[in-house]
Amino acid sequence: MLTAQEGGDEGAVQALNQLTWAGEVVITWPVAVLVGATAAAALRSRIFPQWHAWADGIAALLFLLGGTTWAKDGFWAPDRAYGTITFLLFLAWLVVTSALLVRRAETAEAPLAARAST
């Protein structure tokens, strides 16, 4: 990251840092919609285990809360603890959901056309 000590304009560096943190806060809303939609679809279709669908719902609520982290300092600031928590939560959700999808794809039956040709 460019800093003012490395020859960057102090005002520009500060503006870019603020833009970065604002982007991280704003991106939590679409992530919350994605995770929430996955939870709703998983509850209806039972494509994922029920524990995963309920965990997705809780995670979606936590992401929605992440969209309110506009404090300048402390736990609720986007560059502090809650921003890190939501980032790590998204990574964990992504890994677990991907693993469940891969596992489901491995155990799925072959399509009818593939079974007929063998």
Image: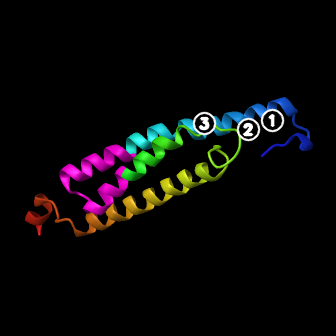
Which label sits on residue 13? 1
- The residue lying toward the viewer, choosing from 42 and 57, is 57
Disc 2 secondary structure class: helix
Q: Is residue 92 left or right of residue 41?
A: right
Identify the residue under disc 3. Answer: 23
Q: Where, by quadrant of the figure, is residue 94 drawn?
A: bottom left
Q: Amino acid at mark 2?
A: Asn
Specify the quadrant that holds the C terminus: bottom left
Residues in magenta? 35-57
Q: Amino acid at mark 1?
A: Val
Disc 1 secondary structure class: helix
Q: Residue furthest front?
A: 74
The image shows residue 68 at horizontal and vertical percentages of: 54, 37
Q: Is residue 88 left or right of residue 47?
A: right
Q: Is residue 54 magenta?
A: yes
Q: Where, by quadrant of the figure, is residue 93 drawn?
A: bottom left
Q: Is residue 88 left or right of residue 105?
A: right
Q: CA distance from mark 2 to mark 3?
A: 10 Å
Q: CA distance from mark 1 to mark 2?
A: 6 Å
Badge 1, how many Cα within 10 Å: few under 14, some, many 20+? some
Of callouts 2 and 3, the N-terminal one? 2
Identify the residue under disc 2. Answer: 17
Which label sits on residue 73? none
The image shows residue 75 at horizontal and vertical percentages of: 64, 49
